[in-house]
């Protein structure tokens, strides 16, 4: 039986706004980030998508986004397995210091961070475990840009990558232990709420 996972990136944070590398460290949602989460919530309402269960990473920016998306009405569980990539000594530094994408995966290990493979493995293990639970037909999981990217590379390597703006939503079908990416939803944040 097919199940549906909506894997979502959090709203804009202060570090996003200031163009700082943000992984294991945290910063709060900006007012723009809260508005983005409200618009993502409207997407789910307009499409009559109701969740059986919801999960967020243990980082505040993800749990705050989830609470806004669900109008503070849905209980959820916070999980370390879907937290953001740990960028080691680069945490809190300028995004200008990021390496080229082709060398990104292993770059941060020598600076006390994680590899892309480590992030992908914990994301896959955690999300698989969630989707194997009973009564988990339609699930929301709020995570992070780097973590969502490594998961996408593993489960949809041929999907055209065009960036993961804040509050992007990956819709995956899950069946027989396999995730299939159906679509990537990016919102128009210029519209009024």
Image (cartoon, helix red, strand yellow):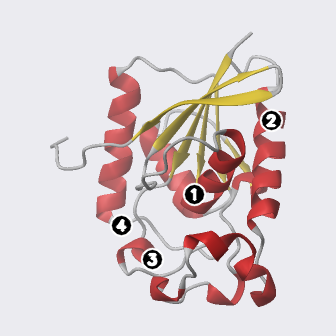
| Residue found 53% across the figure and 38% down from its top | 170
Q: Nearer the viewer, residue 95 or 23?
A: 95
Under tag 3, what secondary structure? helix
Q: Which residue is mark 3?
A: 15
Q: Nearer the viewer, residue 128 or 46?
A: 128
**Could you give the CA–CA distance between mark 1 and mark 4, rounded to whole angstroms?**
16 Å
Q: Which residue is mark 4?
A: 30
Closer to the chain start, of discs 2 and 1, is 2
- Mark 4 vs mark 3: give the one in front: 3
Split into 4 quadrants, where in the image is the C terminus? top left
Residue 128 numbered mark, or none: 2
**Could you give the CA–CA distance between mark 1 and mark 3, rounded to whole angstroms?**
13 Å
Under tag 4, what secondary structure? loop
Image height check: is 191 above or below 114? above
- Mark 3 vs mark 2: give the one in front: 2
Q: Nearer the viewer, residue 99 or 60?
A: 99
Q: Is residue 138 visible?
A: no
Under tag 2, what secondary structure? helix
**Could you give the CA–CA distance between mark 2 and mark 1, rounded to whole angstroms?**
17 Å
Q: Which residue is mark 1?
A: 144
Residue 110: % across, % down: 80, 87
Q: Quadrant of residue 59?
A: bottom right
| Residue found 33% across the figure and 32% down from its top | 42
Image height check: is 142 above or below 15? above
Residue 12: % across, % down: 40, 62
Image height check: is 56 above or below 30? above
């Amino acid at each position: 039986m097919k199940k549906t996972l909506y894997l979502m990136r959090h709203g804009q944070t202060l570090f996003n706004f200031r163009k700082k590398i943000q992984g294991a460290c945290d910063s709060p949602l900006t007012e723009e980030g809260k508005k983005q989460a409200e618009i993502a919530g409207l997407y789910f309402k307009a499409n009559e998508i109701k969740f059986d269960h919801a999960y967020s990473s243990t980082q505040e920016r993800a749990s705050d986004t989830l609470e806004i998306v669900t109008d503070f009405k849905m209980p959820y569980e916070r999980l370390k397995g879907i937290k953001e990539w740990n960028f080691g000594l680069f945490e809190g530094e300028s995004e200008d210091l990021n390496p080229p994408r082709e060398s990104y995966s292993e770059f941060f290990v020598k600076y006390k961070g994680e590899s892309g493979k480590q992030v992908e493995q914990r994301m896959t293990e955690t999300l698989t475990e969630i989707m194997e639970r009973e009564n988990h037909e339609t699930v929301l999981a709020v995570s992070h840009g780097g973590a969502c990217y490594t998961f996408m590379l593993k489960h949809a390597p041929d999907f055209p990558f065009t960036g993961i703006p804040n509050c992007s939503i990956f819709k995956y079908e899950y069946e027989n232990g396999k995730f299939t990416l159906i679509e990537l939803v990016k919102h128009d944040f210029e519209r009024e709420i």
